[in-house]
Structure formats: structure tokens, C-alpha cells
Image (tube, rainbow, N blue to C red):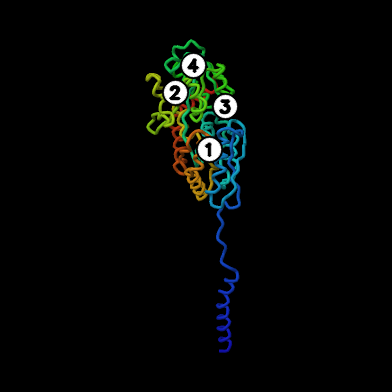
Amino acid sequence: MKMALRLIVVYGLLQLALPLTHSAQGAPAAEQPFYAGKTVRIMAGFAPGGTIDLSARLFARHLPKYIPGNPSVIVQNMTGAGGQVAANYTFGVAKPDGLTLLQSPTGPIMNAFLLPESVQYDVRRVEALWVSADSWVTVINVKATQVKKAEDLLRTSAALRAGGSGLSSLRTLRPKLALELFGVQHTLVTGYQGSADLLLALDKAEIHLFEDPQDGYKTNIRPREKEGSVAVLWQTGTLTAEDTFKRSDLLPQVPTLGEILPKDKRKGVAWAAWKAAVLPQAFQYMTSTTPGVPAERIAILSRALEKMTQDPAFRKEFESTLGDPPDALVGAPADRMVKEAVKRLFDDYRQGTDYLRALAKKK
């Protein structure tokens, strides 16, 4: 009986001691956000000072405050092969932990079709987080060619020279393809490093026409257009789900190639190639991450990017730096757009992408 009473007393004392012990130790610490104390890298596959680098640095300045845990965000320039080195690293080497992002144009997607030997990942697994559309314009030297509108291409006596960068770059392939669709004889001059080089070559009549993004229109093209030294022949626009071309809201006065090319030319494999070449303009600027990142971290990054994109300070700086407003699809809609485009390139425009790849091998 005494033993039983002692056990009851001891048990009661232990019960009383437990809350005191818990209180002395304190409540468990709240779980820290995953990104607290970490560093997020934005890979830029091009040299400092270009459009991709500038946009990556804008993101790095504005994004941290919208990610729970306020991580450091830095830009790492990994140049080579027109951005493909950075893409291969991001999609094929980097850990799928949500700490590596890629800022890129359409190359990481289109190279899977145009330069498949350079791509070291499954393009269908690329995880897009933020995408923005862009329309590109084809500009011609009026004084050297006497061409003021697309129809004049068929009447010019000039031996037309189209300028471009790399042979497999869409800014090189699209003007070349368009001239082929018109049936205009021409030669291709490549190796220019960017818009500044191409514009200088156009002014000096080393080349007669080239393609430039719409964000350079106000600064570079419009003043020359007003003085009559250049003309804008057409814009790419964007390809809709209905297989039609939509003019950019920023260039409503410039027709798409589909509007001015004769109807009998808008058929066959070359026309399918033009659609394949314009389709990626819907995600000309893209922020993506490594395949396999956990869904909850994708959601965190997507919410942060959406809030950043709505920030008036970010929008103002983006437009003043890059020339276009940062109107973008973010998160699941962005990823869905890219994956649907990839599927169309594989299923609907495969003959067109094959044609583009063959075109890249021809001077």
C-alpha cells in the first residue's frame, strides 16, 4: 500500500514538472523560410551590358524583397555558344533546388530544333517562370536599295545583302527566309555581334537589311525612318493559337509578313518554317529554372516574380532600361505557354523546323 502511494506521488510530481520543463526550454522555434540566408543565382548567357544581362540585373535588384527569407540574388554571366553554355548548365548541371534561374531569349528552346547537337537537356522539361513577348522588325536601307515597302523588293536592282549574327540565330534566319518567300535573290552576311553593329553596317551599306527587336525602334529606327534613310518593311508579330499573326500593340502601324506576302506564297514548308520561326516570339524574354525543382519552391518564385512585375518602381525602371513595359505571363500560365509551343514545334511545325535547320547551313 505504501509503495503504491509513493508511486502515485512520484507520478504526480513528474506531471507537474513537465510543464515547467517545457516552459524552461521554450516553445519550438518557428521554421525558417527555405530561402532565408541563401543565394539565388540568375544565369545570363551573354556578356554584361546586353539586353539579357540588363534584365537579369533588374530582376536581381527587385526580386529579393518578394521572396520570403529575403535571399541574396546575384547575376552570373556564363557566356558561350550564343547563351547555350548557360542553358546547358542551368537545365543539365545545376541542382534542382530552386537556387538557379536562367535569363534568356528563345535560344534554349529553339536550339533543340536548330542545333540539337548543342543541347544537353530535354527541352520539354524546361520550367518557365516568367515570359514576355516581343515583336521584331525588318529594317532596310532606303538610299542604297530604293526600297520603301515590301513590294519594292521585287523591283530593286540592288544585289541585296541581309545581315545577321550566327547562322542559326532567328534574327539571321527570318529575314533570309522572308526574302526566299518573296523570291528575291540575296546574299547573307553574318558575324555581327548585336544591334549596334548591325545598325552601323546598315548605315554604311555593308548590309541592306536586318532584323531588330521592337525595343530598339524608338531610339534607333524611328529617327532614321523620319529622315528617310531607312524603312521598316514588316514585323514578326506573335503567332496566335489560331495560326494567325498579331501585330504588336507597340507597333500597330507596321504590318506582319503574313499581311503583305502574296497569298500564293503563304503555303508549303517554307511558310511552315516562318510560323515556326515566329512562334517563340511569344516568349522572347524568359526566366526559367532547373527541371525537377520542388513544386512549393516553384510556387514561391512564381509569386515573387508576379509581385515584382506589378511593382511600379520595377516597371518604370524596366521600361526606361529596355524600352518595353514588363507585361508578362508568370508561373503556371508562362510554363504552359512554353510547353504548348514546344509541343507545336514538335507536332505541327516539325517540317518547318527541319527547313530552318537546313536553311542555317546555307549562305
Closest to the observer, 44 or 15: 44
Q: What element does badge 3 sit on?
A: loop
Neighbor class of circle 3 (other Cα within 10 Å; few <14, some 14-19, many 20+) is few
In this view, 69 is above or below 10: above
Q: Position of residue 363 (x, y in %)?
A: 55, 18
Dividing the picture into quadrants, the one containing residue 203 is: top right
Task: Please name the residue that numbered disc 1 is placed on.
Answer: 122
Task: Please name the residue that numbered disc 3 is placed on.
Answer: 194
Cα separation, mark 2 vs mark 1, equals: 34 Å
Instruction: Point out the tag, 3 or 4, that comes first from the N-terminus.
Output: 4
Task: Please name the residue that numbered disc 2 is placed on.
Answer: 234
Closest to the observer, 11 or 282: 282
> Mark 2 belongs to which amino acid?
Trp
Instruction: Point out the tag, 2 or 1, that comes first from the N-terminus.
Output: 1
Task: Please name the residue that numbered disc 4 is placed on.
Answer: 142
- The answer to whether residue 91 of the structure is visible from this angle is no
Q: What element does badge 4 sit on?
A: helix
Q: What element does badge 2 sit on?
A: strand
